[in-house]
Image: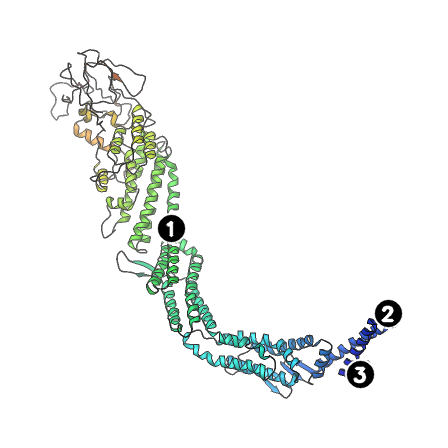
């Protein structure tokens, strides 16, 4: 019977008959006796197979009829309804296949009509000719969102009129299948494009919002594709939330415009600030961003009363733009900033200029004050990068000194050390003009002070790490330090004043310490202790000072006592008010000699004393006019002991080979000045006149008393004991402070008596009851 109905195209009746036949089989199967096995009956199997074959044939007929009822032309983008498939939809619904079949219809409509329309939504048009819908493109002026909704209305009206009948269930089902995606495409392609990107155009969106609301209402009332409980739909929700959409679009536009500014590889600079200390350079980037931020904030202020959501969103966009600046600029322009110190410092200025602009124009906005702080942190980090980069370069240059190891070994090592220091100084001098004018005067001084301080600290550290410094080593190291004086010039013009050493000492923390280290390299132990007691070495730690003394001088009782004195001191006292920076540094210029340190405890000694008195280190105050060996530093590799009781002191190297007499007082003072360190020593003094120093062929200046006292030897190498055993002991050679020393002078006229140029007699007037009080160390 079902086959006959299918042959007559009675699809509804055939469907009903097949469903009735299936129901009868299920009913018979449910009412069978419990002891009956239907699988053993061939009749039931035959009926079941027959039903399945009829079911398959019915579906094939229905699907074939649906394809014939709706025809598509992909090339011409047309849809033609040959016969309304109402009967087919009823049959599919009875077979519970309607959703799947309508989904197939929806896919074909999208393929041939909807997708091509949205691909050319501004120029595409739908035209209805009887039972045919055609999509065409025109050359007219592109339409807007309202025109797009008009064309979609034509499409939905054709489907409602020619494809569907009045069955509301089928309409709702079809509408739920086809409308959601159409509405999303409408929002993405039409409504979002209609959202204005400026506050001035915001009122133009009202017409679009009205048309969108009307379009959605037609889908409910006219076409029956949506039910009333599905309101408001996607379109209505979108247009009602126009404030957020406008703010989002405006924010995206702001970020895109700002990003374009940030990605420019234009590094031209312009001067800002007044001429003088506040003058510096920036690029155009922060100014362009500042103008953009000002426009956005102006719009936010205008939208505040009527569109508060948009106003808040625009405030957030400004913060996002500043975050974008901090993310893009250091990464995208990294190579340029690292190529030269001036480039990185200009970016540092950009950050600070923009931060200051935020603080000035948006002082009441907390979010912008926090953003300004983050910008300043970014600028400071790039300043630190410049500083670290320069210090790394300078330290790499100073590495060639190898810590002044074996500097006295040969002339090549001396030149290597001197050239390394001079090259480091040259690098600093080259940095100065490159960054001056790029940053303001105070930052320039801060940068150069830090760089110079790093160089000086490195050199000080190299000296302090040497465990054994010989006499020649210390002299050569001190000479190599002379070129550092050129660094004074980089501070020229600070506060309109020429650079001076006192000024540099206030700017560079280790300046005074560096030159004191240079002085200590060529000072005697007594001179060092005099400075220590005077509070001039307050910038040294105790461990530093002890380390230098141990490296410079031999291990003697005198050195040990001095070290104990340093270690027992409560603190490294600072100099007195009179010992100002200018006085300290001017001492280098004047080559001042420091008198040996004296003990503050009064000493009294009489020949009648029966106890042995330790006279080591006691000399006559008037003997300062002679080249005293005690004023020469006892270095680790040139160590010797000096005993006051020695009759003949080996003074080799202290005398001019051609002069047989002791030097006059003025010449002695000049020669002594040659051994003292001074800041006035020019960097070009590469060679120091060392004539007369340790020349084995030089004659020895023999200072011998007329009567030799009987020395009492000791097992200590640095002390000697003089014991007056009798009241009238011969004290020849030990002079009273008031006695005069007979020193022959070189006169233009010939002397009447021959004078022994190698010997000089120091004779005391009285040898009995001699008053020895007042002898000091």
Q: Residue 74's quadrant in the figure?
A: bottom right
Percent coordinates x, y for residue 404 in the rendering:
36, 35
**Label 1 SS:** helix
Percent coordinates x, y for residue 237 in the rendering:
52, 75
**Mark 3 highlights which residue?**
5
**Label 3 SS:** helix
Query: In the rendered image of this protein, does residue 548 appear above or below residue 446?
Result: above
**Mark 2 highlights which residue?**
33
Tell me if mark 2 has few (under 14), some (14-19) or many (20+) residues whose alpha carbon lies within 10 angstroms of its own: few
Residue drawn 21% across the image and 27% down it:
600
Q: How is the image coloured?
A: rainbow
Query: In the rendered image of this protein, does residue 265 appear above or below residue 563?
Result: below
In the rendered view of the protein, which quadrant contains the N terminus? Answer: bottom right
Residue drawn 12% across the image and 23% down it:
750
Q: Are marks 3 and 1 in contact (CB under 8 Å)?
A: no
Q: Earlier in the sequence, mark 2 or mark 1?
A: 2
Tell me if mark 1 has few (under 14), some (14-19) or many (20+) residues whose alpha carbon lies within 10 angstroms of its own: some
Q: Residue 258's quadrant in the figure?
A: bottom left
In the rendered view of the protein, which quadrant contains the C terminus? Answer: top left
Q: CA distance from mark 3 to mark 2?
A: 34 Å
Q: Earlier in the sequence, mark 3 or mark 2?
A: 3
């Amino acid at each position: 019977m079902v086959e006959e109905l299918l042959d007559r195209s009675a699809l509804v009746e055939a469907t009903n008959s097949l469903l009735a036949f299936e129901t009868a089989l299920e009913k018979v199967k449910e009412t069978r006796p419990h002891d009956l096995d239907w699988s053993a009956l061939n009749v039931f199997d035959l009926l079941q197979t027959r039903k399945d074959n009829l079911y398959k044939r019915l579906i094939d007929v229905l699907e074939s009829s649906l394809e014939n009822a709706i025809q598509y032309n992909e090339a011409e983008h047309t849809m033609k309804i040959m016969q309304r498939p109402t009967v087919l939809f009823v049959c599919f619904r009875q077979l519970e296949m309607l959703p799947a079949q309508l989904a197939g219809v929806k896919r074909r409509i999208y393929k041939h009509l909807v997708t091509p329309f949205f691909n050319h939504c501004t120029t595409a048009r739908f035209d209805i000719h009887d039972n045919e819908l055609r999509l065409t493109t025109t050359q007219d002026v592109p339409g807007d969102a309202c025109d797009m909704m008009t064309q979609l209305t034509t499409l939905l009206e054709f489907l409602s009129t020619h494809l569907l009948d009045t069955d509301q269930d089928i309409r709702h089902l079809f509408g739920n299948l086809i409308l959601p995606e159409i509405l999303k495409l409408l929002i993405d392609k039409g409504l979002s494009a209609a959202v204005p990107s400026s506050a001035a155009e915001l009122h133009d969106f009202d017409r679009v919002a009205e048309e969108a609301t009307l379009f959605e209402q037609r889908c409910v009332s006219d076409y029956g594709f949506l039910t009333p409980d599905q309101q408001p739909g996607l379109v209505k929700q979108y247009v009602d939330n126009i404030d957020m959409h406008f703010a989002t679009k405006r924010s995206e536009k702001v970020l895109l415009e700002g990003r374009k500014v940030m990605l420019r590889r234009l590094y031209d600079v312009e001067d800002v600030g007044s001429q003088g200390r506040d003058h510096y350079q920036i690029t155009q980037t922060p100014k362009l961003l500042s103008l953009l931020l000002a426009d956005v904030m102006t719009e936010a202020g205008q939208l505040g009363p009527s569109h508060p959501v948009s106003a808040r969103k625009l405030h957030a966009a400004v913060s996002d733009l500043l975050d974008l600046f901090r993310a893009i600029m250091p990464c995208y322009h990294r190579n340029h900033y690292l190529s030269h110190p001036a480039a990185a410092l200009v970016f540092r200025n950009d950050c600070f200029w923009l931060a200051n602009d935020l603080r000035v124009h948006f002082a009441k906005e907390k979010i912008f004050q926090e953003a300004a702080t983050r910008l300043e942190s970014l600028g400071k980090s790039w300043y630190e990068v410049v500083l670290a980069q320069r210090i790394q370069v300078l330290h790499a240059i100073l590495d060639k000194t190898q810590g002044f190891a074996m500097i006295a070994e040969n002339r090549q090592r001396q030149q290597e050390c001197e050239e390394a220091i001079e090259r480091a100084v040259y690098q600093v001098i080259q940095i100065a003009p490159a960054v001056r004018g790029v940053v303001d005067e105070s930052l320039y001084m801060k940068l150069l002070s830090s760089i110079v301080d790093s160089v000086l600290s490195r050199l000080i550290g190299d000296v302090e790490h040497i465990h054994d410094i010989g006499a020649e080593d210390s002299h050569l190291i001190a000479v190599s330090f002379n070129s550092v004086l050129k660094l004074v010039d980089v501070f020229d013009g600070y506060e309109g004043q020429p650079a001076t050493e006192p000024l540099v000492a206030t700017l560079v923390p280790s300046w005074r310490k560096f030159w004191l280290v240079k002085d200590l390299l060529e000072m005697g132990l007594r001179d060092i202790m005099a400075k220590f007691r005077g509070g001039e070495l307050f910038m040294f730690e105790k461990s530093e000072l002890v380390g230098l003394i141990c490296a410079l001088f031999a291990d003697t009782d005198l050195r040990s006592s001095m070290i104990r004195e340093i270690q027992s001191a409560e603190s490294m006292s600072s100099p007195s008010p009179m010992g100002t920076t200018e006085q300290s540094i001017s001492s280098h210029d004047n080559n001042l000699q420091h008198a040996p340190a004296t003990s503050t405890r009064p000493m009294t000694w009489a020949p009648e004393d029966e106890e042995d008195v330790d006279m080591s280190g006691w000399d006559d105050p008037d003997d300062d006019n002679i080249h005293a060996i005690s004023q020469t530093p006892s270095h680790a590799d040139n160590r010797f002991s000096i005993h006051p009781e020695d009759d003949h002191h080996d003074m080799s190297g202290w005398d001019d080979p051609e002069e047989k007499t002791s030097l006059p007082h003025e010449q002695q003072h000049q020669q002594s000045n040659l051994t003292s360190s001074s800041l006035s020593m020019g960097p070009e003094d590469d060679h120091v006149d060392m004539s007369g120093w340790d020349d084995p062929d030089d004659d020895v200046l023999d200072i011998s008393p007329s009567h030799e006292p009987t020395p009492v030897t000791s097992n200590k190498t640095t002390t000697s004991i003089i014991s007056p055993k009798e009241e009238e002991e011969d004290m020849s050679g030990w002079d009273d402070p008031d006695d005069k020393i007979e020193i022959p002078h070189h006169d233009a006229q010939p002397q009447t008596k021959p004078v022994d140029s190698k010997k000089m007699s120091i004779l005391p007037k009285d040898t009995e009851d001699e008053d020895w009080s007042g002898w000091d160390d």
